[in-house]
Each structure stands twice: as structure tokens, then as C-alpha cells.
């Protein structure tokens, strides 16, 4: 499905394998606050492999003797990876069970401390990745391309957002047509539709040569926040954009603010007009308008060649996808056979 979206630096010519084994895909959550040592919530930093986030959450509930709803986490992490992830378990008025009982070949508890509040998604600031690409077809060329990638790539939602073979979009259409769907799946399908619109708008900006240029009506976002404002011809915006103080955005379609205007509105309409059924469906569920930066710029970047392998390291803000970096770097094959879930929604 992702092949329909444009590349910033052209479609990669060279190939590589990813996730041949779990240790090839390492992810570490970076949180904004640290537990203070007191309270009814036990915050746990856990290194895991061979299980996804939900499976480990169930295991933690059983260990603590509490309902699953009392276990919280900030983001979803994949099974076929080595991940360091934070959880919190609500245990009011109870001693913390022995964390050593959780440790085995798949799970290691790195820390466990009390805190006054449960873990929320907003606590997750970023994810640190260390990814090994195996059987790289041209190591030198991929290393050279990396220097372009670190300048920033399209902030696409990855293929895992759309389900197997992009099937979530068809499921959303059936849901909007009246098919009954369980509540957790409803939000997944709605998110898939909004993600599709976003990706198509970003792709269209690339095609029109305005990926990194201001256009009339652009909605800007202050870097490091969700605060947005409309571009109205301010003289200093180009300098602020180039310095990274502000970012260009595309909408996650919904209702809730003044209508979009000028060239920006026309750009969005070019995409939404292709999907009238999906747009009517989003209106029916009263999706709320939001905005997302269109460019993803990795930080703390590194690259090392080891024979025919390349190891890349980088940090991405929460909610972004490592596959958005990889798809610009190489034409990769996921050996694990799973859609990547390396993000922090």
C-alpha cells in the first residue's frame, strides 16, 4: 500500500532485509517524567522480546492480581523486536509483588518504582531506534543516501496503520455503510481513514514541489507542541520554518475549527474529493480535526557498516514511524513476515 505515496529522494534502488531476528530491531521508550517513588501506581521499565504490548499487559495484570484495565502503557510495541517499554500497574494499598517473578528469557524488569499517577500516552516523548539492515545490496550507496535521509522525510503513517494489505480501509467503508463493528475496532478503522487522507495530502505536496515550501493558508505548528496557527503572509515565517521553530502540517480530517482557506484548502480538497464515502463516514462519527507535521526529521542519527550489514540509529518523536525512515533509505523486506509496529501511538 505504501508504494502509492511519493518519496522525497526518489524510490530507493538498493535492497535490504530487516528484522531477520528480534535483536535487529531495538526500540527504547523515552519518557518526559520519572516516577517519584510514592503513590498507588507502580511504574515499570521492562525489556521484552517475543511478545507484543497487550500480551505483556495481561501478564502484568496476572502478576499483580488486578484487572487488566489497571495496567497502562504509553505506546504499542511489536513482538518481533527487542523493546524497552514503560508500564504502570495500579495497586492501591498493596505491597508491590516480587518483580523477579516476571523475569525470564523474554522479559527483564529494568526498574520498578511507585508514582502518584498512572502512565499516560502523553508521557511518551520519543523512541530511540537501533536497526540492523542485513544483506544490503550496495552498502556504500546506502551510506551515502543516509546523509540525505537525516535532512527529513515525509512523516507518513506506516503500513501497519492500514492493516494487512491495507484492509482497514475496506473495513471502514463497510462500517460506514452500517456494518456493526466492535468499539475498539471502530477507532482503529477511523484512524486508518484519517491516516490515508494525511498520507495522500503529503504525497501530493511532494508531487507539486511544495513539500518544504509555504503556500497561502498553510497551518503551521510550533515545534515541540500541538499549537497551530494559520499562515497569513508573515515575513518571518520562512526563516522560522528553515530554523525548525515551526513546521508545515497536513490535517487529520475532522470538524472543529474555522474552514481551511486558500491554496491549502484547495490542496486538501483535491484529496478528500476522491473519497466522498469516507468523508461522509468521518462526518457521521464526528471525527475531530487535528494537525500533524508533514516532515519527520530524525535526531541523534548514526550509521555503521558491518560487512554487508548496516546499523542505523536515530530518535523519533512519539507517534511517528521508523518505517517512514527506512522506506526512503532502502527497498526493504521484512523477514519476520509481520507488518511493523515500531511506533508510539
Image: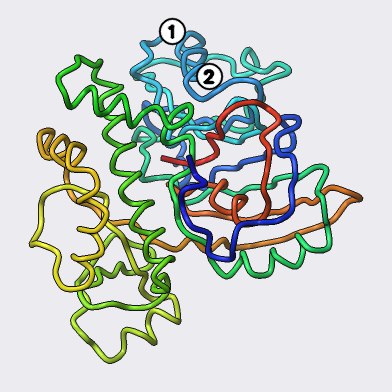
Q: Answer with left or right where residue 272 lies relative to residue 314.
A: left
Residue 166 spot, x, y in % from top left: 43, 32
Residue 180 spot, x, y in % from top left: 19, 14
Q: Answer with left or right where residue 313 lies relative to residue 227.
A: right
Q: Is residue 173 above or below residue 127?
A: above
Residue designated by label 2: 56
Q: Is residue 40 above or below residue 105?
A: below
Residue 338 spot, x, y in % from top left: 59, 27
Q: Front-most of 52 and 9?
A: 9
> Toward which corner of the image does residue 212 lie, by quadrant?
bottom left
Q: Front-most of 223 and 184?
A: 184
User: How far apart are the alpha carbons under marks 1 and 2?
Assistant: 14 Å
Q: Residues within 10 Å of mark 1 (few under 14, many from 20)?
A: few
Q: What residue sits 68% from the left and 38% below the top?
A: 333
Q: What residue sits 66% from the left and 25% below the top?
A: 49
Q: Answer with left or right where residue 291 lies relative to residue 232.
A: right
Q: Secondary structure at mark 2?
A: helix
Q: Secondary structure at mark 1?
A: loop
Q: What residue sits 30% from the left and 67% below the top?
A: 221
Q: How is the image coloured?
A: rainbow
Q: Is residue 287 above or below residue 326?
A: above
Q: What residue sits 45% from the left and 13% below the top?
A: 61
Q: Comparing marks 1 and 2, which lies closer to the viewer?
A: 2
Q: Answer with left or right where residue 54 lies relative to residue 47.
A: left
Name the residue furthest bottom: 235
Q: Which label is found at residue 180?
A: none
Q: Front-most of 79 and 99?
A: 79
User: Mark 1 or mark 2: which comes first in sequence?
Assistant: 2
Residue designated by label 1: 65
Amino acid at each position: 500500500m505504501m508504494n502509492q505515496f511519493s518519496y522525497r529522494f526518489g524510490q530507493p534502488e538498493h535492497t535490504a532485509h530487516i528484522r531477520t531476528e528480534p535483536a535487529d530491531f531495538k526500540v527504547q521508550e523515552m519518557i518526559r517524567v520519572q516516577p517519584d517513588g510514592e503513590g498507588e501506581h507502580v511504574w515499570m521499565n521492562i525489556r521484552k522480546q517475543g511478545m507484543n504490548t497487550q500480551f505483556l499487559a495481561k501478564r502484568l495484570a496476572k502478576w499483580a492480581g488486578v484487572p487488566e484495565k489497571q495496567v497502562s502503557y504509553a505506546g504499542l510495541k511489536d513482538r518481533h523486536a527487542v523493546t524497552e517499554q514503560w508500564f504502570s500497574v495500579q495497586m492501591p494499598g498493596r505491597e508491590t509483588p516480587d518483580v523477579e517473578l516476571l523475569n525470564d528469557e523474554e522479559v527483564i524488569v529494568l526498574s520498578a518504582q511507585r508514582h502518584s499517577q498512572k502512565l499516560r500516552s502523553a508521557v511518551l516523548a520519543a523512541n530511540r531506534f537501533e536497526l540492523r539492515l542485513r544483506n544490503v545490496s550496495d552498502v556504500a550507496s546506502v551510506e551515502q543516501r543516509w546523509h540525505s535521509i537525516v535532512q527529513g522525510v515525509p512523516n507518513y503513517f506506516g503500513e501497519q496503520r492500514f492493516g494487512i494489505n491495507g484492509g482497514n480501509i475496506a473495513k471502514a467503508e463497510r462500517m460506514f455503510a452500517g456494518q456493526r463493528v466492535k468499539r475498539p475496532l471502530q477507532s482503529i478503522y477511523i484512524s486508518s481513514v484519517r491516516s490515508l487522507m494525511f498520507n495522500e495530502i503529503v504525497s501530493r505536496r511532494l508531487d507539486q514541489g511544495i513539500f518544504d515550501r509555504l503556500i497561502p493558508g498553510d497551518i503551521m505548528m510550533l515545534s515541540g507542541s500541538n499549537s497551530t496557527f494559520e499562515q497569513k503572509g508573515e515575513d518571518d515565517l520562512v526563516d522560522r520554518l528553515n530554523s525548525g521553530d515551526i513546521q508545515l502540517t497536513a490535517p487529520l480530517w475532522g470538524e472543529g475549527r474555522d474552514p481551511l482557506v486558500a491554496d491549502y484548502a484547495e490542496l486538501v480538497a483535491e484529496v478528500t474529493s476522491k473519497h466522498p464515502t469516507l468523508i461522509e463516514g468521518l462526518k457521521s462519527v464526528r471525527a475531530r480535526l487535528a494537525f500533524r507535521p508533514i516532515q519527520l526529521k530524525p535526531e541523534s542519527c548514526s550509521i555503521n557498516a558491518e560487512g554487508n550489514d548496516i546499523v542505523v540509529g536515530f530518535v523519533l518523536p512519539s507517534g511517528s514511524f521508523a518505517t517512514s525512515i527506512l522506506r526512503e533509505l532502502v527497498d526493504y523486506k521484512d523477514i519476520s513476515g509481520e507488518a511493523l509496529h515500531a511506533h508510539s501511538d
